Amino acid sequence: MARSDARLIRFAAIAAALLLTIFILSKGSTTTYVASTNQAPSTGSSSSTSAASANVKANTTPEKPKTPVSSNPKDKVSATFVSLARNRDLWSLIGSIRSIEDRFNKQFKYDWVFLNDEPFTEEFKRTTTALVSGTTKFGLIPKEHWSFPEWIDLEKAAKTREDMKQKNIIYGDSISYRHMCRFESGFFYRHELLQDYEYYWRVEPDTKVYCDIEYDIFKFMKDNNKQYGFTISLHEYAATIETLWQTTREFIKENPQYLPKDNMMDFISDDGGFSYNLCHFWSNFEIGNLNFWRGEAYSKYFEYLDKAGGFFYERWGDAPVHSIAAALFLPRDQIHYFNDVGYYHVPFHNCPIDDKLRLERKCMCNPKDDFTFKGYSCGEKFHTVNQLEKPANWQDYS
Ligand SMILES: Nc1nc2c(ncn2[C@@H]2O[C@H](COP(=O)(O)OP(=O)(O)O)[C@@H](O)[C@H]2O)c(=O)[nH]1
Ligand SMILES: [Mg+2]
């Protein structure tokens, strides 16, 4: 009797300890840091007294969250990462994934959609799934989204590739690069795996995020009604888009209703829309609202461009196509420059030059490398046309 009592007590003690451990662990896993949607004041205290800078706005860099808040699944935005990749891109892509997981996603566990024009290998699926904290999904691109449409004159397209090869234009002779640009321009957001989502973050192989992102960046987009976010902007290679602007002008002449009054034409044109100044957001990094691409204005615009044939008769990139559309069809305050993420895709870096911000966010980059205010960038123009306050020391990095 005494021995079985003792056994019962021992059993009860072990069960209680086990329950306590489960309780502590479950509490730990539901506690996280969520976004502070606080905006920086629209004018800094020092600039608010200056007449010259009265119109200058601070960039809406979210403040670092200070208090841990219980995560609530209802707070999570319907969002996913999306990477277009070939099987052989696996080893370059896992560095990009790891960087984003370490700096952001391990805290938020958003899904990751991978798209390919060929089936993904088991190795690709296994390796990426091991690294992503959210759910991974693997999609095959339908043939009609990755092939020549029937109205394209294949001989004319081949001639372009030959000419561009002679001129040493990068990817000038590539068919697959053209399919890639057309797919990223007009089809990725229509893929069935993306139908469940509202926001996306595009991630390419061999890229890095330099800073801690301790707020929910998708929630920031949604709460602040941002439709498109970027880190780097620059001038496009003119020889790849010779008739893109002329085609765009025809489209907007026929469809002026798609341009809101407060669009950002002044970012992409220096003469009120007569010519394109080649400025575009570098689309290898994009955080955006999929519904903008799915909407009427962009759908009609893409269709118009696709019919014009420039994805094949020239080498129109998805970056200028997306950028022109965002600048023309969105009110300017719905386009966001992320100055606090830090980003690298060969050969350009975005690295916060504001010491306080860079150190606070634990950015792993040299501010001297920051491209934002350098000559070939369009970062200064973006700040100027949107009356955004530049960091005090920006000229030291131009
Ligand atoms: N599935 C697939 N993905 C591609 C192909 N070509 C490029 N990509 C992907 O498209 C994106 C852009 O390609 P990338 O080579 O990085 O072009 P770059 O950044 O303009 O030099 C990357 O995510 C690539 O993995 C292709 O033929 N098939
Ligand atoms: Mg790339």
Image (cartoon, rainbow, N blue to C red):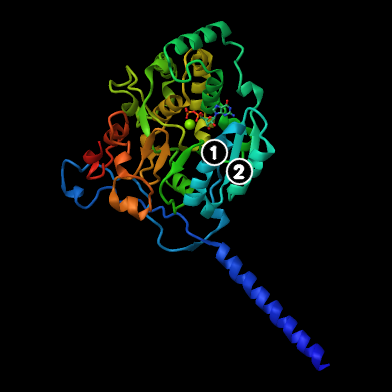
Q: Looking at the image, which is closer to me, 274 or 232?
A: 232
Q: Residue at x 19, y 51 (%)?
A: 46
Relative to residue 344, is residue 311 depicted above or below?
above
| Relative depth, front residue between 147 and 14 | 14
Q: Which mark is residue 34?
A: none
| Residue 19 seen in render | yes
Quadrant the C terminus occupies = top left
Dot label at residue 128 = 2
Q: Residue at x 42, y 30 (%)?
A: 326
Q: Is residue 349 left or right of residue 171?
A: left
Amino acid on which disc 1 is placed: Leu
What is the count of numbered marks?
2
Q: Amino acid at mark 2?
A: Thr
Q: Secondary structure at mark 1?
A: helix
Q: Give the quarter of the image for residue 343.
A: top left
Q: Is residue 251 left or right of residue 175?
A: left
Return the residue found at the far right: 1
Residue on which disc 1 sits: 93
Disc 1 residue lies near ligand 1 with CB under 8 A: yes
Residue 344 to residue 162: above or below: below
**Residue 241 visible (yes or no):** no
Residue sitting at 28 percent across and 35 percent down? 373
The answer to whether the residue bearing label 2 lies less than 8 angstroms from the nearest atom of ligand 1 is no
Q: Quadrant of the N terminus?
A: bottom right
State yes or no: discs 2 and 1 in contact (Cβ < 8 Å): yes
